[in-house]
Image: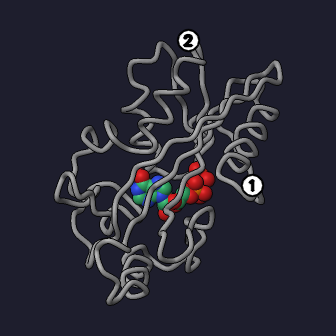
Amino acid sequence: MKKIIFATGNEGKMREIREILSDLDAEVLSMKEAGVEADIVENGKTFEENAQIKAKTVCALTGEIVLADDSGLEIDYLNGEPGVYSARYMGDAPYSEKNAELVRRLEGVPDGQRTARFVCAVAAAFPDGRVKTVRAAMEGRIGYEEKGKNGFGYDPIFFLPEYGCTSAELSMEEKNKISHRGKALRAIREELK
Ligand code: ITT
């Protein structure tokens, strides 16, 4: 069976990735499972650049097909912040504090101006040097407080108007059907067949 390494250390992402790629005729291994240790410097300016850096670095180290996800939350009222810095925003503070701070920064801002999106770029790096990159987004709004226990990161404050709940209140299967990550991975899946 074909082996694919997913260059991520984020377990929340990895759970979703396994479900989304479950019908792929390949064994999908996390970096940890593949025994890869790499301290990758994500110094790209875009989600695409960072996804490519991660995928290419691990592909060069292993000689295997490698996928990587670079994602984040763009809040329009904050000029796209935290964006590509979503993982680094407020350093090691727990997400309960990061979420509370973002809600605080939008205090008094009406619904119509609370628009935001989760963005995900996925890069696939192949041992022959080819690199393929796709991007997808999920549109929503910043809520007024944390709601829901599913998902990870900023999910509890990401309100989906059509569903009347946050992405942390959806089951993983429901989130994967509509999420930035689900859409990007389904788009790149064709390249892996
Ligand atoms: P890897 O680089 O090892 O994959 P990371 O967490 O550092 O893990 P990123 O640099 O891509 O990954 O940062 C993505 C951050 O964006 C992530 O840590 C969350 O804070 C946020 N994020 C992305 N997708 C999300 C989602 O589906 N739900 C909630 N938060 C998300």
- Between residue 26 and residue 190, name the one nearer to us: 190
Badge 2 residue CB within 8 Å of ligand 1: no
Q: Which mark is residue 60?
A: none
Q: Is residue 151 above or below residue 81?
A: above
| Amino acid type shown at disc 1 | Asp
In the rendered image, residue 14, in percent from the top left (x then y), is placed at 46, 43
Q: Mark 2 — residue?
A: 193
User: Mark 1 vs mark 2: which is more N-terminal?
Assistant: 1
Of helix, strand and loop, which one carries label 1?
Answer: loop
Q: Mark 1 — residue?
A: 39
Q: Residues within 10 Å of mark 1 (few under 14, many from 20)?
A: few
- Between residue 50 and residue 112, name the one nearer to us: 112
| Amino acid type shown at disc 2 | Lys
Left or right: residue 173 versus residue 19 is: left
Q: Is residue 162 above or below residue 6?
A: below
In the rendered image, residue 35, in percent from the top left (x then y), is placed at 65, 38
Quadrant where the image shows the C terminus: top right
- The residue that appears at 28% across and 74% down in the rendered structure is 111
